Amino acid sequence: MSSTKCPDQRVAVIVPAKDEAQRIAATVRACRSIPRVDLVVVVDDGSVDGTQDHARAAGAVTVRHSVTRGKASALETGASVVGMRDYVHGPARLLLFIDADLGDSAAACADLVPPVVDGVCDMSVAVPPRQHGAGGRGRVVHAARRAIARATGWEPVAPLSGQRCLSRKAYEKAAPLAEGWGVEVGLTIDVLVAGMAVIEVPCDITHRVTGNDRAGVLHRAAQYKDVVRAVAARTLRRHRVPAARYEKAAQEQNAFHVYRAHSVRTSEPGAGQDGGQGGGASTDAPAGSSRSAGA
């Protein structure tokens, strides 16, 4: 899928990576094949293998953290590098966040770009198919979905998806990003509270899943802790859309359609600065999509 609008709009891919020497080269090559992508930045977050060398050999611009600082910090470092490399004359690049372990399937994230380029939304989020062998009982996913719904009225299919394309304005509304594994939940809440629009897009991507072994249990525990921290920080700041504002949008929402929690009125406390249309705007969903994907 490619857009004919904004022919000069370019996209930068940011890949946070830690100890991904075996997969990072395939991921970088797939990212470079995505239309409009002219820059791939891999941020090596304190790897002890050859992640940075493999990424550079595959054609990425690489930056390395000497110590592990977490996913959010890696994304912020990548965004800073992109900003320094943006064209003096021309629109700022869109940011496409892609996980390092997608390998060849990262090319499917091309479908995330057109909705943002065409102005349909400010952030698009990939919904993967069900992953064979995934452990856990979905508790972290359910907790993240409930938290986003309480803050914005939106119930996403894939609240923890790391594959996202967003405009620079949307990124700036969410910066600084929520720490650790809470970054995705924080991004979604922050962008919607700012009055911007979000859409989920089915993407045929595959990644390494966490099983029910000790490592998988520890990973999900850390993920849950970071999600709770991200939500708590926004709750304490009263960073949310008033329920009366998103009620109509929440009732009318459909999977894989654009969701905007409310129209922003800057005179209201906590309202974002970007204008928007009334809540619940929707567009045609991608062909063949259904809510069951990745649920």
Image (cartoon, rainbow, N blue to C red):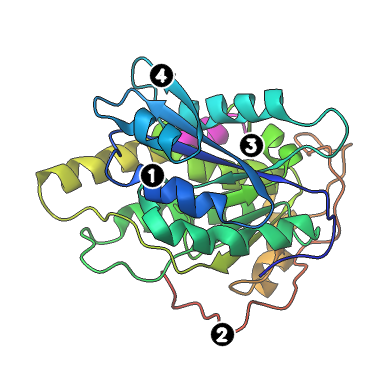
Residue at the (36%, 36%) spot, across then down:
54
Question: Which of the labelled discs sits on residue 288, or is there none?
Answer: 2
Q: Residue 1, relative to residue 289: is it above or below?
A: above
Is there CB contact under 8 Å for labels 3 and 2? Answer: no
Of circles 4 and 3, which is in front? 4
Of circles 4 and 2, which is in front? 4
Label 2 element class: loop
**Residue closest to the eye, 157 or 49:** 49
Residue count near mark 2 (Cα–Cα under 10 Å), binned few <14, some 14–19, many ≥20: few
230 left or right of 276? left
Residue count near mark 3 (Cα–Cα under 10 Å), binned few <14, some 14–19, many ≥20: many
Dot 1 or dot 2: first in sequence order is: 1
Dot 3 or dot 1: first in sequence order is: 1
Question: Which of the labelled discs sits on residue 239, or is there none?
Answer: 3
Of circles 3 and 2, which is in front? 2
Residue at the (89%, 36%) spot, across then down:
267
Give the quadrant of the N terminus: bottom right
Cα distance in 3D space between marks 4 and 2 = 41 Å
In reply to whether residue 20 is colored magenta, the answer given is: no
Is there CB contact under 8 Å for labels 4 and 3? Answer: no
Name the residue that disc number 1 marks.
25
Residue 149 place in picture, x, y as percent: 55, 56
Residue 114 place in picture, x, y as percent: 71, 62
Q: Quadrant of residue 172?
A: top right
> Magenta region, mostly helix, strand or loop?
helix
Name the residue that disc number 4 marks.
65
Q: Residue 142, relative to residue 48: is it above or below?
A: below
Q: Quadrant of residue 70?
A: top left
Cα distance in 3D space between marks 1 and 4 = 19 Å
Dot 4 or dot 2: first in sequence order is: 4
